[in-house]
Structures are given as structure tokens and as C-alpha cells.
Amino acid sequence: DAGVTQSPTHLIKTRGQQVTLRCSPKSGHDTVSWYQQALGQGPQFIFQYYEEEERQRGNFPDRFSGHQFPNYSSELNVNALLLGDSALYLCASSLARGRTNEKLFFGSGTQLSVL
Amino acid sequence: QKEVEQDPGPLSVPEGAIVSLNCTYSNSAFQYFMWYRQYSRKGPELLMYTYSSGNKEDGRFTAQVDKSSKYISLFIRDSQPSDSATYLCAMSSPSGGSYIPTFGRGTSLIVHP
């Protein structure tokens, strides 16, 4: 059973560029959440996708956008990259169970460096 | 003040020691409490998951939640070098139809042989 897979594993970009990160959820999961983890910090919630819609969003600017496809995979797009966007980007999948807590399963992340 | 506070460490202990990791929080609406383990250059892995106050045990790991004090703990018995990792606490409450966990910054644990 494949877990959460993310691509690419590493990425180097320059300021002002745009980047797209990809995530395939764990088999059987229908919800994808994206997190940003700066060095020495805990993961910060960016947004969550369910049924191809953005269901919840954290405190991130609209330079951060996403998409979920019918097969539940997801993309995170970041425009106009800043140096401060350098971080580990984590994708987590879960199975929506209505109004109850969802156990998150994380991928290994994409390490983004902005120069 | 952050919603979830966690000492970053590092915490260094000898093999076989009992380890105590802790978090405090300010949001009394939190209902679910979790501990994740994160190895270097990997994503977090869910270790323990509890609802409301009380204790939960799973092998060498015990999670405790004290909602009255807004304090949660993770105990690791007979610690092993393979337990060396960053331990993240996380907690969630209902918001907009889903539960989005808020994470602490993590405590780095080093278990030396």
C-alpha cells in the first residue's frame, strides 16, 4: 500500500519565479492538506482540499494556490517566490469522516530553496 | 503568545532512560491531541492520538492530557537510539467543518548508547 508521495523531493528556484509541487494521497484517502515547515519550526497549515474544493485555508497570502484532481491528487502552486518561502512543504492525506478529527498521514516533503 | 508552546530542546538522554516531552496550549477549544515523530528529512509520523483528557498507552509510549491545566505529555519508556528524532505535539478543534491540527515547534530528542 503506497503511502503519501510527493514530487519533486528537492527544488531550487530564484526570487520571483513560480513553482508547482505535487502530491498523491495514500490509497483510500480523499482529503489533502498542505503544510509549510520552516527550519526548526512546526508545520504551518496552508490549505486543505476535499472534493476538488478548497475547504479550509490558513494564514497564507493568495500567492499560494492549489488544486485537487478527480483522482484526489493535488498540486500546490506558489507565485512570485520570496526568500522567505524557502521551507519543507509537506502534503498530508486523510479520510474525511464528517465532523470528526482526521488522522493525517504525511509525505516526506519537498525541500524548496529560493535564492 | 503562541497557541501551542513546546520546548525545542535538544533533550539528550542515555539509552534506557524514561523520556518526558511536554506541550502547553492556550486554546481551551482543543479536543484532539496528537504526537508525531519526525526523523531528519522525513515527514511527521503519527505516534499517539487521544481525545479529551486522560491517558493512553501504546507499547513504550504513554500520552497524557490534562485539559484543566492545558498541558499534554508524551512519555517514552526504555528509550532507544532509534527514538532519536523530533517530536511534535499537535491539537485540533472543530473549525469550518473540519479539524485542522495546530502544531508545536517540536522537541529534538537524542538518545545516546
Image (cartoon, rainbow, N blue to C red):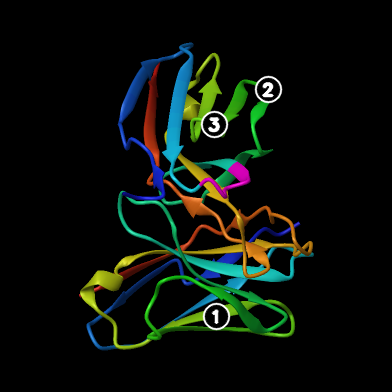
Identify which amino acid the numbered label 3 is placed on.
Ser
> Where are the magenta residues, as a range?
B28-33
Q: Is residue B50 left or right of residue B37?
A: right
Q: From the image, which quarter does the C terminus of chain B lie in?
A: top left
Q: Is residue A28 magenta?
A: no
Tell me where residue A23 sits by quadrant.
bottom right
Q: Nearer the viewer, mark 2 or mark 3?
A: 3
Identify which amino acid the numbered label 1 is placed on.
Glu
Q: Chain of mark 2?
A: B
For the residues beneath circles 2 and 3, the answer to whether they share a chain is yes
Q: Which residue is mark 3?
A: B68
Where disc 2 sits, the SS reads: loop
Q: CA distance from mark 2 to mark 3?
A: 26 Å
Name the spot of residue A45 as percent of width and height, x first: 47, 64
Q: Is residue B41 above or below residue A89?
A: above
Q: Chain of mark 1?
A: A
Q: CA distance from mark 1 to mark 3?
A: 40 Å
Name the spot of residue B4 as percent of width and height, x first: 42, 46
Identify which amino acid the numbered label 2 is placed on.
Gly
Mark 3 packing: few (<14 Cα in 10 Å), some, or many (20+)? few
Tell me where residue A36 sits by quadrant.
bottom left
Q: Which residue is mark 2?
A: B59
N-terminal label among 2 and 3: 2
Where disc 1 sits, the SS reads: strand
